[in-house]
Image: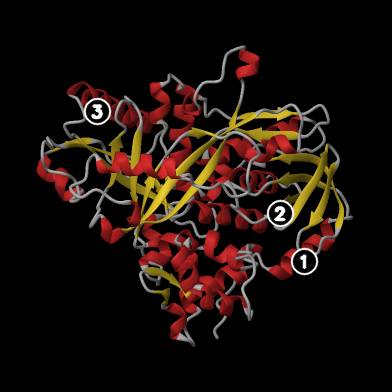
Amino acid sequence: MSTATPPPGGASLSAARRARELTATVGGPAVDVLVVGMGATGAGAALDAASRGLTVAAIDAHDLAFGTSRFSSKLIHGGLRYLASAQFDVAHESAVERGVLMERTAPHLVRAQPFVLPLTPLVSRAQSALAWAGFRAGDTLRLAARTARATLPAPRRLSAVETRHLAPALRTQGLRGGLLSWDGRLTDDARLVTAVARTAAAHGARVLTRVRALELRASGARVRDELTGEEGEIRARVVVNATGVWADGLIEGIRIRPSRGTHLVLRSDRLGPLPAGLHVPVPGETNRFVLVLPQGDGRVYVGLTDEPVEGPVPDVPEVPETDIGFLLDVLGSVLDAPVGREDVVGAFAGLRPLLDTTAEAGSAAGRTADVSRRHAVLTSSEGVITIVGGKLTTYRRMAEDAVDVAVATGRVSAGPSPTASLPLVGAASPTALATVPAPRRLVQRYGTEAAAVHALGTSDPRLNEPVLAGHPVTAAELLWAVRHEGALDASDLLDRRTRIGLIPADRTAAMDAVREALGEETPTGA
């Protein structure tokens, strides 16, 4: 079996590296910054601090992108939604960060996605005019953020024929055309987190998964190795709590108001060719849509909901039948042949870590769809820094703000953040990416590393074949994830490094290939 050249700059994560760095960190000398939580924001904070020259340890009780960061719509939004609620600063910040990802830091993972809003009889002419004004305003945001027109084309009106061409599954009766808009789409949200974490590791950060924080204090944390059960101390000059919806479980005085966003998983052949995604208006709402998101891997996601969640926060949220029914009903309102419950082959739900400020405002809690997505950096009475709120698109800015606060404490010293112009592992210009000698699908997932992934099949071509029918992930990708992306068990491979596990039947079918990649006789973490 061929071994491809490891990524440069120490970006490889592996079980052996974890073991070495865990031994050096627990009970060892204090690091400058300890980051707790390795979703998008936590991984971003680790990269931000390490790229400023600070020593960093970053831990997660589970795996990279274990929580909310793998359950998003896979979209990099330009902030249009926030204009409607007059959150102009949030809208501009989103548009700026979208441009950063698409043009500088991750052009291999984020590309332009067209969306069609079909003008059906359910969409009044007033609603159509409002939506068109919104898309034009979104294009103004693009201009203000200095994102090139070549990166994001202009919105335009579509005839009924053009609309049907981009979305053949639409009902033709009463269709009077559509509105075409563009936004950023991630190849995969969990892959973005993995790339950020590996880039942090290349800058010297110690990325330690399966390490649970039991107690936080300004001088560090008491932790437990979830693989062995051993407990110890990690000393740090500054601690950043980036645990999202679980943040208030580690620090008192923070009120998190989780909101559940649910997506359905359908087989692509159920809806037929989809050159574009869809914005499907929710009946009775003026500015709320269900999204139809073709993934290019034989699957389509349909989402999302925005429902408040009460009670203890689970590690992995369950998808209620009410959410499934709601999404199917909205989708069915525009299709020739409505999708049935039997067509839903998988579903997933993520919890948005919204900051609850209703107590301070003295107002009653409204629906979570109305809660601001503005992020906040808070410092506890013990001196622990917590970053909450925000969204996937703005993870880099959230991380920068958190590390700025860390530097402002005076306990560490560093210059300004360089991450707005720091390419992630695998990133390159579109021109350079076009010359990478590997299948285009791999380039869109691994960037310049795609050739090394594909080269794993040099001595055994079977490694470059899909591990199951109907899904493009190859055995080489599984092997790469174990050797270079820190995957430790079957769940890491199926649920985060790839998304095979979103469909239970596919998960079962791929298990033999996963066992082989892990070099195991029996699956773990499944």
Q: Which residue is mark 3?
A: 132
Q: Say whether disc 1 or disc 3 marks the residue closer to the N-terminus.
A: 1
**260 relative to 327 in the view: left or right:** right
Which type of secondary structure does the marked residue at label 2 adopt? loop
For mark 3, does the 10 Å Cα neighbourhood hold few (<14), some (14 to 19), or many (20 or more) residues?
Answer: many
Amino acid type indicated by mark 1 = Ala
Q: Say whether disc 2 or disc 1 marks the residue closer to the N-terminus.
A: 1
Which type of secondary structure does the marked residue at label 3 adopt? helix
Q: Which residue is mark 2?
A: 205
Q: Residue at x 41, y 78 (%)?
A: 465
Residue 364 at what x, y percent from top left?
57, 16
Amino acid type indicated by mark 3 = Trp
Check the image and report above or below for 28 versus 261.
below
For mark 2, does the 10 Å Cα neighbourhood hold few (<14), some (14 to 19), or many (20 or more) residues?
Answer: many
Q: Which mark is residue 234?
A: none
Q: Which residue is mark 1?
A: 19
Q: Say whether disc 3 or disc 2 marks the residue closer to the N-terminus.
A: 3
Residue 490 at what x, y percent from top left?
59, 68
Quarter occupied by residue 35: top right
Amino acid type indicated by mark 2 = Ala
Q: Quadrant of the N terminus?
A: bottom right
307 vs 514, nearest the viewer: 307
